[in-house]
Image (spheres, rainbow, N blue to C red):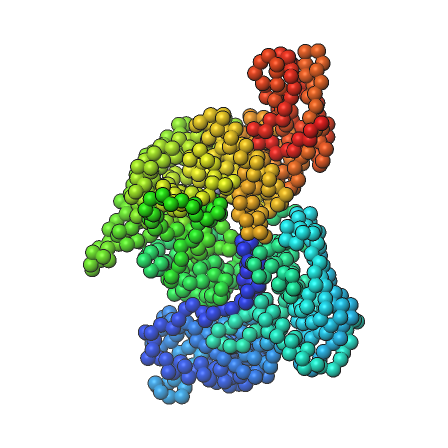
Amino acid sequence: MKRILGAVFLVLACAIGAGGHVRAQEPVSPQSPVATVSGASSAADAGIAALIGALEQTLAAGDSVGYLQLHTENANRERARSFASTELVPGATRAVVRERDREGLPGTLPGNAYRLIADAFAEYGPRARAASWRLDVKRVGAAGTPREWAIAEEEALSSVENLYRLGLDTTKEFVAHNLKVSAEDIDLTLVDGTVFVAGTDQGVTGLVLLGSGTFNFHPAPDTEKGQVRIFCGAESLETKFAAAYLRLNPGDVPSVIAAAQLTAAPVDPRDLRRAQEVFRDESQKSFQIDLGDLSRDAWSLLPQSGDFVAEMRTRRYDTLTYAKAGNEAEDISFFDRRRHHNIALYASKQKLAARGRFYNEDDLLDYDVLDYDIEVAVNPDRLWLEGRARMRIRIRAFQLGTLTLKLADTLNVQSIVSYEYGRLLGMRVKNQSTLVVSLPTVLAHNSQLTLTIVYAGRLEPQTPDRETVALEQGRQNSEDVPLQMQPEPSFLYSNRSGWYPQAAVTDYATARIQITVPSALDCVASGQLEPGFPGLLAGKEPSQNRKVYVFRAPQPIRYLAFIVSRFTRAETATIGFGPAKPETAVDGVALAGTSYRTLNLSVEANPRQVQRGRDLAERAADIATFYESIVGDSPYPSFTVALVENDLPGGHSPGYFAALNQPLPSSTLVWRNDPAAFGGYGDFFIAHEVAHQWWGQAVAGRNYHEQWLSEGFAQYFAALYAQHRRGDDLFASVLRQLRRWGMEESKQGPIYLGYRLGHIRGESRVFRALVYNKGAAVLHMLRRLVGDDGFFRGLRRFYRTSRFQKAGTEDLRAAMEAETGQKLERFFERWIYGSTLPKLKLGYRVEGNDVVLTVEQLGEIFDLPVPITLQYADRKPVDVIVPVTDRVVEKRVPLAGVLRGIEFNKDDATLAEVVKN
Ligand SMILES: [Zn+2]
């Protein structure tokens, strides 16, 4: 038997940390299991219900003898006794058994034997236990007789132990003076006040602190200090609290709380009332599970040893939450509950010692999805989706008893069947978009299984992502705007909507997707459209006609997506890249998967955008050809641009396609002052989105910190294309914009903070300024520092070693160092992991026919290229690059004329402040 306790904690963990949206601990609640009893077996209902009722009584009584009497004559008594000894523990104060699933037992006459899955729940006062059982039952008597059905065989499938119905001890109150509570990087002091406790048979697990208290949160990492400064103006947050609720493992109480400062006192009813109010609100925010129809009470899990949660009610900031959760890659968090913002999120000292400075989100995954076969019918009118997903899965864990999948909460799971093991039991976890599938046996590392999950429900399409620029200040105040046109509606289902069962983090897999839409609509999805599709499926009435699409993705993609709208094929073409360049073979790194020498490119456009779509097709082909020439590979055999009308420019790029927003001319929104809006260069968005096929899809970051590997790279490739297509002046103006935004916002944190940049203040432009623009500028500086040849060889090596895998900045560094022979540790340390900017002092002296340029670094030492313009009295200025990797660097340059002076070249993307002499 296995315990699903681990799975429940895992689920809790997803809620606290990953994805980085909300790190608050929401109540964990297995809903009624997904499989339902089928109507076909209704003839047996009364008899089986009677057996379940009798079983419930034996559980309530802990009656092993009575349990044995529920068995058939041939049942294995030894097995039944052993089951009873662990599952029917005497002393229950309440017991519930619920049938969850029923199917005919193979090799028996229909209606005479069933395999049941049942949930059992037993309370022992304030403690409880829940379990899932498999029961094979047979008809042994006539219908309507008391013993119509009996148990032939049983197995305990899973259990949740140590559930507690927590409550404050109303008989105890403690007076506290200078009571200290300490966890890593946080200290609470209850200067004067009272304390109430919530206990279990294992000791105290919850405390309510009332009175006058202060706490000090002082994260160790510099980056997190910077984030705390953005939140409160200082590197550590010290503030008063009037009440706090603490949750911890009973075994940790002595090390966390200085209990000697507590003195027992008579209970004051007013204090108790207040403490109960705090307890009621705060205790349900973590470690809580909801057992659905097994029990209406709130049951709580015990925190693992070392885990700790403190909810602090402050006057200034409302409720702030400190949490330490050992099963997270970044196990310390500090969270603003009112505004749902992570303020700090990082690894504890112990975690750093165990896993090192960097981590891959895949290391937390128990399994790997290898291939998907999905059939989905979509009705955008009702936002209704019906799906059937077959997934081939390989186990990564040493051994695994439950699979935790992500699937949108609103999608109801109708069945889960494994090709190898038959029908499986699944539990939905409320408000977590999680499905926990119970495996019938513990599977070993590398074993495979195939699951088919049938589901249906209402699902909202996903809202445009961050890639869309921000509004400057709402709508333009203009009265001569023509009649407002409405954008053509489109419905995007992608990585954030949970439209198909998937792992908690993105996972490279191949796929076949069949999508059925109303015949008036069209569809673009991840993959290549199969020949002969779309096909028409005639309904009873013309209004019920459907269109069927089949897309195939033979190369692995990170996540699957589709967009439904009214589309007209604007263009389709096959681009040939010519033979592979021999140079790429020299890299000595073999590519995983296939390398394509052609690309099938199509543009599907909203009807009003067909002409624009035709122009775009030519541009997209040119862009893809240019990128292929840089990288030496095109990762996917096809690419479709879905040109959709939208109020704002921007886009979304899954593998194999990009949805590109086309703002209508009548749009009155103002979005120009955004880091990602390049006025005067309309192709920037398409160039950025096409680049994501290489950066963001074929190669992706290993966790949220590495987002710049997709966004910064896509931005830089778009800049390179601007230069390729329109020349140096445009390139210079793009670089200026990268530099300006990058410098302005650098103090908001390092590029390595990913989505958390601008998060505390809710300002997405900060994210784009740094992850997109500064990220691109860093690549340009790297190129200037190591030279074009080494840079582009390094880029290709990075791409080849990382294709269809998750990569980190360290992999980029290794590739660049291998190709250039230069040490780049400090370069990435300063530019990616750090947030300061270099401060330079420039000078020169003329010696004979040479000028000696000097660059001095006044602040931290950076590695950077310093572009200097030599101003001549008698000829055009000349630009020189001085590679700087020390505090003082000199470079001798032969003079071409009469030198008038030197100037720091601000057109270049070197992010440095130059101090005037
Ligand atoms: Zn992007």
Identity of the residue furthest to the left in this view: 541
**Foreground residue among 727 and 553:** 727
Q: Residue at x 54, y 32 (%)?
A: 736
Q: Which residue is drawn at 43% across and 68% down?
A: 34
**Residue 246 at x, y = what percent?**
66, 68
| Residue 166 in view of the camera | yes
**Residue 414, quarter of the rendered image:** bottom left
Identity of the residue furthest to the bottom in this view: 145
**Foreground residue among 446 and 208:** 208
The quarter of the rendered structure image containing the C terminus is top right
**Foreground residue among 624 and 158:** 624
Q: Residue at x 57, y 73 (%)?
A: 299
Q: In this view, does 294 lie above or below 437?
A: below
Q: Which residue is drawn at 62% across and 69% down?
A: 302
Q: In this view, does 717 lie above or below 104?
A: above
**Foreground residue among 245 and 581:** 245
Position of 190 with respect to 758 (left or right) is: right
**Residue 846 at x, y = what percent?**
70, 15
| Residue 258 in view of the camera | no
**Residue 718 at x, y = what percent?**
47, 34
The quarter of the rendered structure image containing the N terminus is bottom right
Position of 220 with respect to 442 (left or right) is: right
**Residue 832, quarter of the rendered image:** top right
Q: In this view, does 776 lie above or below 499?
A: above
**Residue 649 at x, y = what percent?**
42, 43
Q: How many marks?
A: 0
**Residue 342, quarter of the rendered image:** bottom right
Identity of the residue furthest to the right in this view: 260
